Image (spheres, helix red, strand yellow):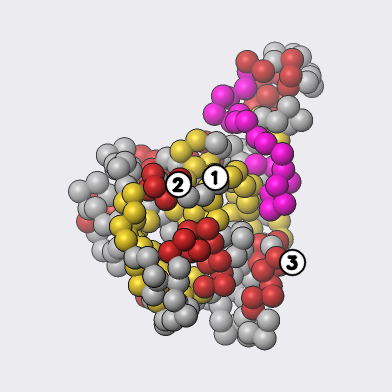
Amino acid sequence: MLIKQADELHPSEITPENVYLNRRTFIRIASAAGIGLASSAVFPHLLDSQDRWPQGKKGPYDVSEEVNKFKDITTYNNFYEFGVDKGDPAENSGSFHPKPWTVHIEGEIKKPATYNLDDILKLSKIEDRIYRHRCVEGWSMVIPWRGFPLADLIKRVEPTSKAKYVTFETIYRPEEMPGQKRSVLEWPYVEGLRMDEARHPLTLLAVGLYGKDLLNQNGAPLRLVVPWKYGFKSIKSIVRIKFVEKEPQTTWNLLAPNEYGFYSNVNPDVDHPRWSQKTERRIGDFLKRKTLMFNGYGDLVSGMYTGMDLKKNF
Ligand code: MTE
């Protein structure tokens, strides 16, 4: 994957008023106006409306780090179906139609069917979750996702005892996704999880962020979010979910098996063959920070890998 810097991007922060505010923009505007530091509550009209959303009480899985700006999250993307540069997905995804949407759910389950996304959404309680997002390229963000646990859906479709893994497939629509006309990757993009990973309460099917529906560049209308794994596991615009017995193939592993394994757990002790994974740059920060084992979710997920050699199962 390409590594690029996003020098234009700035983070935001959570305020006591339960809205996300861009402190740096505020401070910049306030100091330019000779106001000095003032309470954001005094000048709410100066704030970017995109960076506000009605945030409920913090949930048990929310991180309390500064959340990235809406603009960071929606203009600095990897979605090769729309091009390989970070700005391409926002720029080239305008003709993509995420509605109406159906998802084929099949394989080792008792209730295979083609489901309308609207019907899937009726089955679950939609929640907001603030997660760290660590890309294998060495950058990270904090994103307020909106979605529901994949575990809820799995329960409804009743997997058989043969279901050991879940596979996911992105839509193939080259007429709307210009990147699919080029063979940079094998299309459609595919990913997979072991059943325990798929059922883990942190694993979300996301339908939105910042309290709004997902934009096309972020994987509308339905994408996976697995916060203790590198971002490429979080497959976008999912149209097929299949339950299988054997470890499935995944897009990046097919392309470069020595660089991208099946597990792809965030691990500062296992370098990518071409670069270190010990540190990361949070988009909007100047200095790098240390990458945390399992992206900081170790107390919740490490038990799933007990006894496994994570250097071999990277
Ligand atoms: N899903 C599809 N279908 N195509 C992609 O190119 N890129 C992956 C992942 N999901 C990708 C994808 C990578 S490498 C990352 S880091 C995340 O999406 C980026 O998600 P974001 O753009 O919402 O930050």
- Which residue matches tag 3? 299
Q: Secondary structure at mark 1?
A: loop
Q: Nearer the viewer, residue 94 or 183?
A: 94
Q: Is residue 84 above or below residue 48?
A: below
Q: Are marks 3 and 2 in contact (CB under 8 Å)?
A: no
- Which residue matches tag 1? 126
Residue 74 magenta: no
Q: Which amino acid type is marked by label 1? A: Ile
Dot 2: few (<14), some (14–19), or many (≥20) neighbours within 10 Å?
A: some
Q: In front of the other: label 3 or label 2? A: 2
Q: Which amino acid type is marked by label 2? A: Leu
Q: Secondary structure at mark 2?
A: helix
Numbered circles on residues, count: 3
- Which residue matches tag 2? 121
What's the residue at 64%, 27% (across, down)? Answer: 25
**Which quadrant is the N terminus positioned in?**
bottom left
Marks 3 and 1, Cα distance to the nearest angstrom? 24 Å
- Magenta stretch? 46-67
Dot 1: few (<14), some (14–19), or many (≥20) neighbours within 10 Å?
A: some
Q: Are marks 3 and 1 in contact (CB under 8 Å)?
A: no
Q: Are marks 1 and 2 in contact (CB under 8 Å)?
A: yes
Of mark 3 and mark 1, the one earlier in the sequence is 1
Of mark 3 and mark 2, the one earlier in the sequence is 2
The secondary structure that most of the magenta stretch takes on is loop
